[in-house]
Image (cartoon, rainbow, N blue to C red):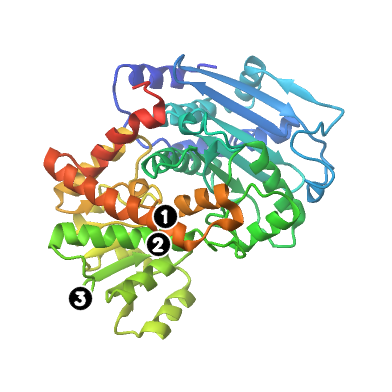
């Protein structure tokens, strides 16, 4: 389906122009509020579809869609893996809808322009597709965002992509959630490439109520989605690590992590990798990797931020921390004292006086407006998609502005790889994985190779962000250019 908006966007893209205006605007949200259906999942509900896929061929520059009813409304997902698996026929009333009919139905419901915006996001990020899975009875909305599969195509594992599963609240705008998933899946392709992991990039974003550990219906559905999409997710923001233990016991082994895992949470290895990168950056900039006497601002004390804060404190750093949950800040203060741990309000963490800024929460926090207000000399943290951008070109441009401000910064996926390295080790070795095998792999990626990247950037006069993109392009896109 090509509509007027999409024609204009595509013409601009083919001419090599960059669309700089934000894709999601307040005017558009007002328009969306007046539509008969406000998004893809509303459309699926009205049409009685359980799954819908959008495919994009980069070679042909074409989109295809298919929508399907694959299971009945009363299917008991708490019995997944016991009574049925993702390969089974789950309804006597299967039906499928192709591209033309879906396009016409979307247009009729006022979602033609909305689809065009989703397609534009996919084109900008060079994605391969999105698979939508809808549990209507529970209003669980899962979008599996697929970036490049090149790295995973011939890896001889069941899974061909790797990327975590993240939960969003139901009140969040669907297009914001899709954008988050696409940005994260693109970053995962690059992250896997730079970490030498043989899996393509993906991300599953789920909109649903908070998941309780005894809610086997919801957890069974999420397990179905993971098996169906041939990836091995871990529990990301909004989902408890202990949920993975329930999944392992009742549903599938195709999740990694869990409180009972031999490597426990993937947050701690990610934090260790960030510590390695921060120390190398300090040595590169100041001539010493010592953190004693340095001040580090840590935004977010979650799965990664809290262990990172502890690593930094044990290295002698002073911290300025922010988190919406004050209990986490108080926990650090009680352990290490208020002389070494200071709290900043969440909206003021961007302007505190610190040597290093370590974003460890949500992405999109490095914006053109904020850059002049930063007082940091180094920005390195675990948060995904720290640059407020939706394409590689926009990220490189924004990274140059950070460098022009005198700040050492490297795009997050080039160093927040500890978690995915741990996940891949768990996937490949299962219960035989251990810390002795993991730490050298993290140090190679986040210390040795990261330092090489900084040195090469200095020699070439390019930002480390632009340089690392150049390094992984062929790996991610299979030589397409």
Q: Which of marks 3 and 1 is nearer the N terminus?
A: 3
Q: Earlier in the sequence, mark 2 or mark 1?
A: 2
Question: Is 57 on the left-hand or right-hand side of 70?
Answer: left
Pointer 2 local density, CA inside 10 Å: few below 14, some 14–19, many at least 20 = many
Front residue (pair 237, 250): 250
Q: Name the residue under label 3.
A: 293
Front residue (pair 95, 452): 452
Q: Which quadrant would residue 97 be assigned to in this image?
A: top right
Which residue lies at the image location 67% right of the left edge and 47% below the top edge?
222
Which residue lies at the image location 12% right of the left edge and 42% below the top edge?
459
Pointer 3 local density, CA inside 10 Å: few below 14, some 14–19, many at least 20 = few
Q: Name the residue under label 2.
A: 271
Question: Is 455 on the left-hand or right-hand side of 168?
Answer: left
What is the number of the mark on residue 134?
none
Residue 113, image x and y in percent?
51, 26
What is the number of the mark on residue 418?
1
Residue 400, image x and y in percent?
20, 42
Residue 376, image x and y in percent?
21, 61
The quadrant of the picture occupied by the C terminus is top left
Which residue lies at the image location 48% right of the left edge and 54% below the top edge?
422
Indicate the secondary structure of the residue bearing disc 3.
Answer: loop
Front of the two marks 3 and 1: 1
What separation in Å lies between label 2 and label 1 (alpha carbons)? 7 Å
Indicate the secondary structure of the residue bearing disc 1.
Answer: helix
């Amino acid at each position: 389906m090509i509509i007027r908006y999409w024609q204009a966007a595509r013409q601009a893209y083919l001419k090599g122009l960059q669309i700089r205006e934000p894709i999601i605007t307040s005017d558009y949200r007002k328009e969306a509020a007046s539509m008969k259906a406000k998004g893809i999942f509303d459309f699926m509900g009205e049409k009685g579809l359980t799954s819908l896929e959008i495919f994009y061929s980069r070679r042909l520059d074409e989109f295809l869609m298919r929508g399907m009813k694959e299971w009945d409304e009363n299917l008991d997902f708490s019995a997944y893996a016991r009574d049925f698996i993702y390969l089974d026929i789950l309804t006597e009333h299967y039906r499928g809808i192709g591209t033309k009919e879906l396009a016409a139905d979307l247009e009729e419901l006022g979602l033609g322009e909305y689809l065009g915006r989703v397609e534009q996001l996919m084109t900008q990020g060079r994605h391969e597709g999105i698979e939508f899975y809808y549990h209507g009875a529970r209003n669980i909305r899962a979008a599996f965002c697929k970036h490049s599969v090149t790295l995973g195509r011939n890896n001889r594992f069941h899974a061909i992509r790797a990327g975590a599963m993240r939960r969003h609240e139901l009140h969040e705008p669907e297009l914001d959630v899709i954008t988050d998933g696409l940005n994260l899946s693109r970053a995962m392709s690059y992250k896997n490439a730079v970490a030498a992991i043989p899996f393509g990039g993906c991300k599953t974003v789920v909109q649903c109520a908070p998941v309780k550990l005894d809610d086997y219906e919801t957890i069974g559905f999420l397990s179905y989605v993971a098996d169906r999409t041939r990836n091995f997710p871990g529990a990301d923001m909004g989902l408890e690590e202990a949920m993975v233990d329930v999944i392992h016991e009742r549903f599938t082994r195709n999740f990694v992590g869990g409180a009972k895992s031999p490597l426990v949470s993937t947050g701690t290895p990610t934090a260790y990798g960030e510590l390695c990168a921060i120390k190398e950056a300090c040595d590169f900039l100041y001539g010493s990797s010592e953190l004693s006497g340095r001040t580090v601002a840590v935004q977010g004390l979650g799965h990664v931020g809290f262990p990172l804060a502890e690593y930094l404190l044990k290295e002698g750093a002073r911290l300025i921390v922010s988190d919406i949950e004050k209990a986490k800040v108080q926990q650090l203060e009680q352990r290490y004292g208020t002389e070494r741990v200071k709290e900043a309000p969440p909206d003021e963490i961007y302007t505190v006086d610190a040597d290093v800024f370590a974003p460890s929460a949500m992405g999109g926090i490095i914006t053109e407006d904020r850059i002049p207000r930063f007082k940091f000399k180094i920005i390195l943290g675990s948060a995904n998609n720290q640059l407020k951008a939706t394409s590689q070109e926009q990220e490189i441009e924004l990274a140059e502005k950070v460098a022009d401000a005198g700040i050492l910064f490297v795009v997050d996926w080039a160093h927040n790889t500890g978690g995915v390295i741990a996940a891949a080790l768990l996937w490949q070795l299962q219960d035989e994985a251990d810390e002795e095998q993991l730490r050298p792999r993290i140090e190679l990626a986040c210390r040795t190779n990261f330092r090489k990247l900084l040195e090469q950037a200095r020699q070439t006069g390019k930002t480390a962000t632009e340089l690392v993109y150049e390094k992984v392009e062929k790996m991610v896109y299979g030589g397409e250019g």
